[in-house]
Image (cartoon, grey):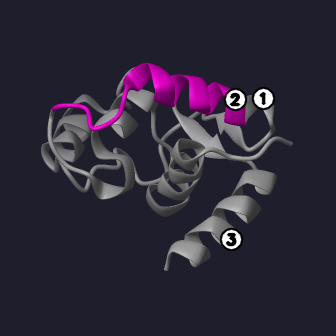
Amino acid sequence: MSELSDLEKKILIHIYKYGPDNPWYMARRLLGESGWAPKYNEDEIEKACKKLEEEGLLQRFQGALKRSVTSSVKPWLKVKAKELDHKPKGIYYDLTKKGKKIASELYKETK
């Protein structure tokens, strides 16, 4: 496995802390950032997620979201999701068992 970049580490910690998420949302709220304008480049986050998936740290998330829509930044997303009773479109990523172990270590280092 290659050395993880800062962005890849942030993605792992974000998913560990907030649950499954997709690159579009992560570009706007990675690690609790807020605002509608992306703080990170969507394409870079997408590439990082795909790389982490290839390395066996992330997997595409299937099924209902654990905590429905995960948004500490935009609470109206939760209301909208309940009304429509579905998850927003896009590929969501979750941690694999190996990814959880690494993300847990990274999270502890940041605390």
Nearer to me, 66 or 91: 91
Q: Are marks 2 and 1 in contact (CB under 8 Å)?
A: yes
User: Where does the magenta region start and end?
Assistant: 37-52
Decide which of tag 2 and tag 3 comes sooner along the chain. 2
Please provide percent x and percent y for residue 84. 24, 29
Instruction: For label 1, count other residues whose C-alpha is less than 10 Å away and answer few (under 14), some (14-19) or many (20+).
Output: few
Please provide percent x and percent y for residue 51. 69, 29
- Eyeballing the image, is 101 above or below 46? below
Q: Which residue is mark 2?
A: 51
Residue 105: numbered disc: 3
Q: Magenta region's main secondary structure?
A: helix
Q: Secondary structure at mark 3?
A: helix
Q: Which residue is mark 1?
A: 54
Q: Secondary structure at mark 1?
A: helix
Residue under the image location 28 percent in, 50 percent down? 71
Please provide percent x and percent y for residue 8. 59, 44
Q: Is residue 91 left or right of residue 73?
A: right
Residue under the image location 35 percent in, 27 percent down? 88
Residue under the image location 56 percent in, 35 percent down? 63
Q: Secondary structure at mark 2?
A: helix
Nearer to me, 22 or 89: 22
Q: CA distance from mark 1 to mark 3?
A: 20 Å
Q: CA distance from mark 2 to mark 1?
A: 5 Å
Please provide percent x and percent y for residue 45. 48, 30
Residue 108 drawn in magenta? no
Nearer to me, 3 or 85: 3
Q: Is residue 18 left or right of residue 40?
A: right
